[in-house]
Amino acid sequence: MIGGIHSALSGLAAAGVQTANTANNVANLNSDGFKKGRVLQAEQLPQGVSTIVEKVETPGAYAIEDTSEGQALIEKSNVDLSEEMPQMMVNQHSYNANLKTLQVADDMTASLFDIKA
């Protein structure tokens, strides 16, 4: 039972990291030259998940803009909102699933105490 709680807490933390990364990507959508982050999740022994955030180095679109030195080719952000919004929905479902696991573990613990008491 403790292992399930630990796994669910680890999943909640991973969903939080993923949500923070997605929010950062969306917040910098219009920042010239910004490189989006991607969260990699890996198994953590004995149970749970660990997260690593890495930058995606693919170039963004280029646009000609007026600068103080005349016109220049400026690299835009490589964030695609059509990828970020579905990821936010996946994050929400992951968070809710791990939260439900915690609620079930809590209910099981309460039932065990009721039986023993």
Image (cartoon, grey):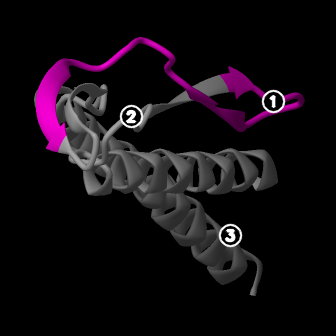
Q: Disc 3 marks which residue?
A: 112
Q: Nearer the viewer, residue 17 or 108?
A: 17
Q: Assign a secondary structure to mark 1.
A: loop
Picture layout, residue 56 above or below residue 115: above
List the residue tagged with mark 1: 44
Marks 3 and 2, the one that precedes in the sequence: 2
Near-viewer residue (58 or 103): 58
Nearer mark to the viewer, of 3 and 1: 1
In this view, the residue in front, 38 or 70, is 70
Residue that protrudes farthest toward the bottom in the picture: 117
Q: Earlier in the sequence, mark 1 or mark 2?
A: 2
Residue that mark 2 sits on: 33
Q: Write the start and end of the magenta stretch as one range.
A: 42-66
Alpha carbons under labels 3 and 2: distance apart: 56 Å
Few, some or many residues within 10 Å of mark 3 (<14, 14–19, 20+): few
Residue at the outermost front position: 69
Q: Residue 112: where, in percent of width, then height?
A: 68, 70
Q: Quadrant of the C terminus?
A: bottom right
Percent across and percent down for residue 33 are 38, 34
Q: Secondary structure at mark 3?
A: helix
Image-based side of 7 in relation to 85, left or right: right
